[in-house]
Amino acid sequence: TNESLERRTAFFDAYDLLVQETASKIVAAPTKKTKKTEDQDLEDSNAEDDITIDNIELEDQSLPSVSRFNPIVTPPIFVYKNIPVISHPDIIECLLTRGKICAEMTEYSDAKEMFDAALRMMSKLLPNKQSLRKLSIVFEQANLTYLRGSFDESKMMHTTILQHRLQLCDEFHPDKASSLYALAVNGITMCKYDDCTQILAETLKIRKKSFG
């Protein structure tokens, strides 16, 4: 509908502004200048025009994150409208929301790009560490895989997500219910009704325990 398109456009415009606002706050970490570093800075400035998406993640291109939660140094993840985008919690949320909107509108390639970028960002903020937030992004990737018709692959992804979630959350955590429900929907699509009955019963039990 026209209203949905207007909301989509408004959100994407807000997302563009957020990316620009975040990028504008990036400042280089202060260092003591020497003749050698000044010469190197000159070489780097001359090479700036050669930066591409393929090499944007090189370590020597690292920039400080402006995350107010965990200010760590991270390299840009990708270039968006000529802006090198770094890891930032607010942008991760925007990427996820934008990906969900694209998925709802069957723009699956765009949705995949958004989810993949969100996961790369989260991996930069939480390197070598599994987390429920990171799993929530993989969960959206699994849902997208289902929407694209790869039911077996989606089932494997959701099964793996559930296993990791069980290691990180308690028995009646809502995320566990979400994984179980996704597996049930996948099973129904694949006509495995007997398996789904038990899964849905367990899902309902968790939701009642969690939300009353």
Image (cartoon, grey):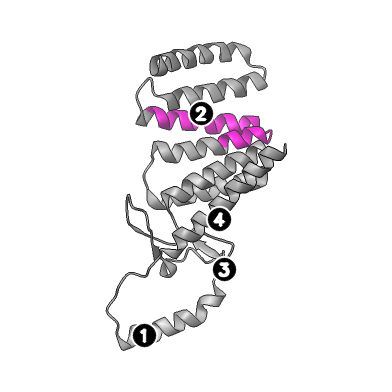
Give the amino acid type for the residue marked by disc 2 in the picture.
Thr
- The local crowd at label 1, few if under 14, some if 14 to 19, many if 20 or more residues have their Cα within 10 Å, is few
Would residue 142 be seen by someone viewing this image from the given angle? yes
- Whole-angstrom CA distance, mark 3 to mark 1, is 24 Å
Q: Measure how far apart labels 1 and 4 are at the Cα level.
A: 34 Å
Give the secondary structure at mark 3.
Answer: loop
Q: Which residue is mark 1?
A: 38
Among the two numbered marks 4 and 2 on one chain, the one whose residue lies closer to the N terminus:
4
Magenta stretch: give its range.
142-166
Which residue shows up at 54% across the image and 48% down it? 116
Q: Is residue 42 above or below residue 77?
A: below
Identify the residue under disc 2.
Answer: 159
From the viewer's perspective, is the residue at label 2 or at label 3 nearer? 3
- What amino acid type is highlighted by mark number 3? Thr
| Residue bearing the label numbered 3 | 52
Name the residue located 55 percent from the left edge and 51 percent from the top edge. Answer: 14
Q: Is residue 198 magenta?
A: no
Q: Name the side, left or right, on which 142 lies relative to 132.
A: right
